Structure formats: C-alpha cells, structure tokens
Amino acid sequence: MKKKIALVLTLVLSLSLALGACSSAADSNLASAPDSDKAEEILGEIADLDDAFGGGDLQANPVTLKIAVLPIIDTIPLYVADNEGLFEEVGLNIEFIPVSSAPELSQMVASGQADGMITDALTVAFFDKEEIKLQIVRYAQTPSEERAHFFILSAKDSGITSPDDLKGVEIAVSEGTIIEYVNDRLLEKEGFTADEIATIAVPKIPERMALLASGEIEAAVLPDPLASIALSQGATVVLDDSQSPEYGASVYAFSTEMIEKHPEAIRAFVETIDFAVELIELDPEEYKPVLADNNLIPPPMLDDYVIPPFPMGIFSEAEWLDTLAWAQAEGLLIVNIPYRDAVNASFLP
C-alpha cells in the first residue's frame, strides 16, 4: 500500500475506529464501532487509492481542479473529502470558488475561472445547446421520500399554508434553473395551470431567504440548508420534492475541456467523492462541524440539524429528457441534446 500512514490514522480517528490487528484495544474499538465491517471495508478501499489511479501518476504530477460552489448542503462530500485529505492523496489540488447564485456559478465555468461545479441538468443543457461544453459526471444530491432537497416555503405571516394558497402568488425563484423547474413541476402535480403559476426572479439564494424572512416576498423556493434556516425563522413548508423525487437532483459537472485534458483526474475525483459519501453515511454526526466551518448552518442550529444521505450513481436518461421537455416548453431551449453526449458515465467505478 502506498497510502500515507498519517492519513490512515486521521481517518481512523475521525471515524472512532482502529485498524484491525494492531492491538487488543484496536480490536475492541473496531468491534464496538457502528457498522465496523463497513468501516473496515471503506478504510481498505481508501488505502488503495494511489494504486487505483495510474500507480502514482497523479501524485507525481498533481492536477488542480477549480470548483465553483453555492452555499448548499450538496457540497458536504466535497468538504469532507478535502478535510480528510482524500483529494491530496490521489494527486488532486481542489480550489473552491464560493458564489451566491446560479448565474454566478455558470459565469465561473463559462469564463474558465472554474473547471467544474455542483449544478443542475438545465445549466448543463444551456451550456451544450450549440456544442458539448459541459458534462455531468455524477449525482451530487437527490431528494427521497424520506428527505426533501428543495422546498416551496411561505413567509411567516403570509397566511399561505396549502398549495391552493399559492395560486397567483409570486414565488421567488432563480429563473431558468432547477429552482424554477422544481417549482413548476411540483405545482403542476397539484393541478396548477400555467397561468396560475407566478414567479419573481431573485437569483441569489441568501437574498431569497432574507426577503422571505422579512416578509417582503410571500413565497420562495429554497434548497437545504437555507430552507432549514428559513423554517427556524418562521417559514412554512407548502410543498417539497420528497413527494416527487424525480425532479430535484443536482449533479457534478465539469468542462469538456478539462475532461478531455485530464480524464484520470476526473475519474479520481468521482471515486473520491464516493469514498466521502460512504464516510458520511457511516457517521454523519462526525461531520457536522463541516456545516459550520463552511458557513452552511449557523452553529446554534447544528445540534438539531440532520445531515442527509448522499447518492451514488449518475443522472438518468428519464430525468434528462424531462429537463429538456420543460426547458423547451418554456421557450428556453429549442434543440434536443442526446443524453449520451451531456452525461458522461465513463468515470463511475
């Protein structure tokens, strides 16, 4: 194994485990840890990371990936992998570029200031409408029946408590993004016609939350964790995508230029995120400080906040086709982009 002993020890301590056969105390720790077999398996896989990606080629010639990030819960695996030194271990230098809105996110990649981002399929489609400039390489986050990803919230004193109350009410969204797409799809499922859905553009997520908290807007669509913060300030959940989990996925996407220039780096990135997801699943409480350290959740909310599970795998063709259908119906897109061109599954383990 080429794995550095210091990193293994860091991971072991972070998971409250000991490597087997080192001592009776280590054996005892491993046996008493939650899901110890899974932990042992993860540690073994992490220890093989160097061999998995070119026998140290990336270690000898590290690649820098610049990633634009919004203040959303989807970023947790990124920060965990960075904190645990996993990116460094496979020869990746990760630079985070914080932004506050989806347009800023796209601008960073379009201008070459970022190589990749956590984004949505609509953004990828807009990049790729003339030529394939951006490709999806992995899911970032998905809703489930147990845990929503996006929420349509009403302001504290708005009197809006049910979907019917939203008819004709301007809902703050980021236009032409997954925020507006999820909003429309959820309301359509409630029987809304196009003329009953009203929106107002507020691209910056923190500004959207602030306007909702002040009552200057009556309703808004927010992702977690800002949705959780809004709820703590008195907002009400009117609808969320746990009822329709096929609509709320976010994705990791990289420029085609970076993918073609450094495919080994993208492959290492995808698998490293997989390892980070496994570590979070094993002990989510261990990684709560990541939320506060990266300004995702205010420290007073940490105790009550539950880190959601994160998915493996990649955006499906059915999801891609529905995304295109919505964009075309809205007049935002006039071309069909083949799924196999925009979604690159070749980097999955």
Image (cartoon, rainbow, N blue to C red):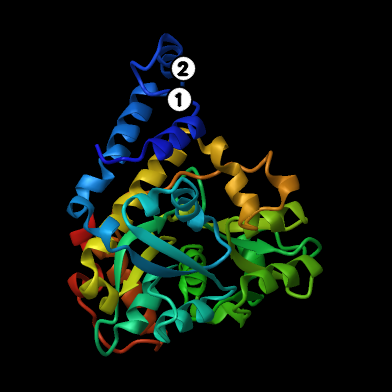
Please state the horizontal and vertical placement of residue 345, each as a whole percent of the image.
21, 61
Q: Pointer 1: residues within 10 angstroms few (<14), some, or many (20+)?
A: many
Residue 326 in percent (x, y) is at: 38, 77
Residue drawn at (31%, 40%), measured in percent from left and top? 3
Residue in front for this viewpoint, 152 or 187: 152
- Callout 2: 10 Å neighbours few (<14), some, many (20+)? some
Q: Position of residue 133 (x, y in %)?
A: 29, 82
* Residue depicted at x 21% and y 53%: 53
Q: Label 2 is placed on what type of residue?
A: Asn
Q: Is 198 or 81 nearer to us in this picture?
A: 81
| Mark 1 vs 2: CB contact within 8 A | yes
Q: Is residue 250 left or right of residue 321?
A: right
Per the image, the residue denoted by label 1 is 17
171 with respect to 344 (left or right)? right
The residue sitting at 18% across, 61% down in the picture is 346
Q: Which quarter shows the N terminus?
A: top left
User: CA gap, disc 1 to disc 2?
Assistant: 6 Å
Mark closer to the chain start, 1 or 2: 1
Specify the quadrant of the image occupied by residue 125.
bottom left
Q: Describe residue 61's horizontal placement relative to residue 331 as left or right.
A: left
